[in-house]
Amino acid sequence: MEPARTVSVLLPLAVDGPYTYRQPAGLDLAPGDIVRVPLGPREIIGAVWDDPPDASVGHNRLRPVSHRYDSPPLDETIRKFVDWVAHYTLTPRGMVLRMVLRAPDALEPERETIAVRRTGVLPDRATAARQRVLDLLADGAPWPKSGLAAAAGVSSSVVTSLIEQGVLETFSLPPPPLTAAPDPDYARPVFDDGQDEAAATLRASVDEGAFSVTLIDGVTGSGKTEVYFEALAETLRKGRQALVLLPEIALTNDFLERFTRRFGERPAEWHSELAPRMRERVWRGVASGEVRAVIGARSALFLPFRELGLVVVDEEHDTAYKQDEGVIYNARDMAVVRGHIGGFPVVLSSATPSIESRVNADQGRYRRIVLTSRYAAAKLPDIHAVDLRVTPPEKGHFLAPPLVAAMEETIAAKGQVLLFLNRRGYAPLTLCRACGHRFQCPNCSTWLVEHRFRGQLVCHHCGHTEPRPDRCPVCDAEDSLVACGPGVERIAEEVETRFPDARRIVLSSDILGGVKRMRLEFEAIRKGEADIIIGTQLVAKGHNFPLLALVGVVDADLGLAHGDPRAAERTFQLLAQVTGRAGRAGGESRAFLQTYAPEHPVIAAIASGDREAFYAREIEARRVSGLPPFGRLAGIIVSAADRATAFGYATALRRAAPETGPVMVLGPSEAPLAVLRGRHRFRLLLQAPRNVDMQAFLRSWLTSAPPPRGSIKVQVDIDPQSFM
DNA sequence: AGCTAATTGATA
DNA sequence: ATCAATTAGCTA
């Protein structure tokens, strides 16, 4: 008897390799085919994979593939990509496949929309309700059945009875086209020389049809988007699909409209807020090739493109590209990998490139395009550092005289002012004047932040809240609690007393009313219905403020004191972004940075506009300490699923092995725990159950003694980035 | 994922 | 000793 034909099927579960299934007679299967298979008591969707079937699985254990979906197969490049990402991130391959198969219902045939129209037959009796329905259909255009009754303000039985009588007939509507193909030649931009040259370079890289990485490094408003749109246009002309990644928060209507103006059609979108129906349709459209261009958040990188020819990563330095749960990856880096595997160009774009990307460009691994001048009428704002030691704010206030004066001038000239402070709430610390008690979070080691509008004390780390008491819980003193330091609410209060006639808007992520309200507020700002905007980080990204003439950074030093080795870089990026909000639409504009350390390299770089000095310094700092992307022994990088755990590990490490040198804590996306030893870069995946003595474990690991008891798993391998 | 078996820690 | 809670193992 012939041995049974078998296939490997990778399942979207936490399993590293495919399982072997019997291939039923009459069902031909090839790698990439999407299938349904039995697993235990149920059936799940998987994909036929390239691994040879496992012959060691006994014939009696083999179960047959149930069904092959009529969906385009996952092409070889995405299968390799899944394997690569899984290997690199030390994640089971099935978990990565799960990100690709994120829209399982997309495989089922699309539910048809049932529509109704008039037949000409008259109803047996004319009632008011029936007439309202017929009125809606009077022009002969069909209506979707589901919405008709509601639109006519009648119950659905009215519609049903009209159908039964033959007055209305039903038929199925073809699904509306998702998006028409964007037209690469819809609206050619007008470029200056620098932009023209940049666009030509990008078009050439698309024409090469080979893997390359280009870093577009250009100040805010230099037209980076318009320039990389030319790469996109060229990709479309060549008949390939294109993907633009944006940090989720920057994926705004503003951006989609810019795309539409250039290409004549709205692009397909992909992000977490997408409605399930739309999600399925986009997934299917991408797989079938109907969708030619996608604008998406990081997870769009795992869509099943069949002829992807370009990935653009906009704001490539943005930390939102890091996924820190489940499969932990940085979409910027994985985009480069996808380009490498697929043999197509990748474009990274930023006004403040990450140090890693700058180093890659400097070392010739990436091409670099620099755009220095601002577009059209836009001019960079004049930036001033306000030395708070020389011109301090009045006692109990936070806006220094030079900034207040500039605000007065700006408002008098009908310009808009943005005050930026990256701190939600009223005050970051509350203490008792009588006994010195400080309000601390019971779960974390952080201070509770007062939110005065809500009357609460909130932990910004874990979300713990408690009502703000009137008297001190320790010494019972009355009216003794004082707020220390400013948050946006407090700045808003100061603005109110100083500029009682100005129209204020406070923008903070904890705003009441959610996304809807936020959208309205941004709309109001655009229409000039606000004079002073007080905002946290979220004003830095995605949204344009066309009337903005003055930016005041309330505390430019905030964030610099952090122990994070990237603190300087992050602060630089944030300040560049915030000050860059001003003057984008033209005209004179100014930015003021309130600081106690105007000579600090970050502040000086922003104030002087000398970015190169800053980069040179930052890169050198990393080089001498051997931090990434330079791979010398630097100590140990600790990273874990959440910051608190990572800090816990780091503390344990410092105690356990002070001789290892610097211990640095990174965010979760740098996990699995990276360890630099000798001349090789190693990655270490460290997983331990709850109460294992981490300190003892790390000590023994570092001294190469056998691991202590307890089920600690260690997996070490050479960093595959060396392959690129 | 969703299920069971094994292990752990807390409690009596 | 016993229970509930957590964690590890497995699906072909």
Image: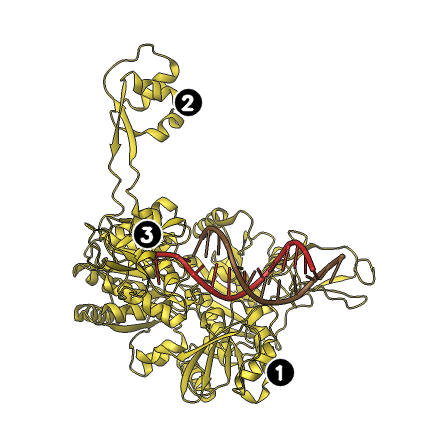
Chain colours: A yellow, B brown, C red
Crowd rating for badge 1 (residues with CA inside 10 Å; few <14, some 14–19, many 20+):
few
Chain letter of the residue beneath label 2 in the structure image: A
Separation (CA) of disc 2 from disc 1: 72 Å
Residue A63 falls left or right of residue A703: left
Of residue A291 and residue A513, the one placed in the foreground of this image is: A291
Q: Nearer the viewer, residue A296 or A714?
A: A714
Q: Nearer the viewer, mark 2 or mark 1?
A: 1
Amino acid type at mark 2: Ser
Q: Quadrant of residue A724?
A: bottom left
The answer to whether A126 appears left or right of A424 in the picture is: left
Kind of residue indicated by mark 3: Val
What residue did someone put label 3 on?
A37
Q: Are marks 3 and 1 in contact (CB under 8 Å)?
A: no
Amino acid beneath label 1: Arg
Residue A156 spot, x, y in % from top left: 39, 24
Q: Residue at x 60, y 61 (%)?
A: A462
Residue at the disc numbered 2:
A155
> Which one is in front in this view, the residue at disc 3 or the one at disc 1?
3
Q: Residue at x 20, y 60 (%)?
A: A240
* Residue at 69 percent of width and 55 percent of height: A466
Q: Which residue is mark 1?
A: A655
Chain under label 3?
A
Left of A685 or right of it: where is A335?
A: left
Q: Is residue A567 above or below residue A305?
A: below
Q: Is residue A408 above or below residue A715?
A: above
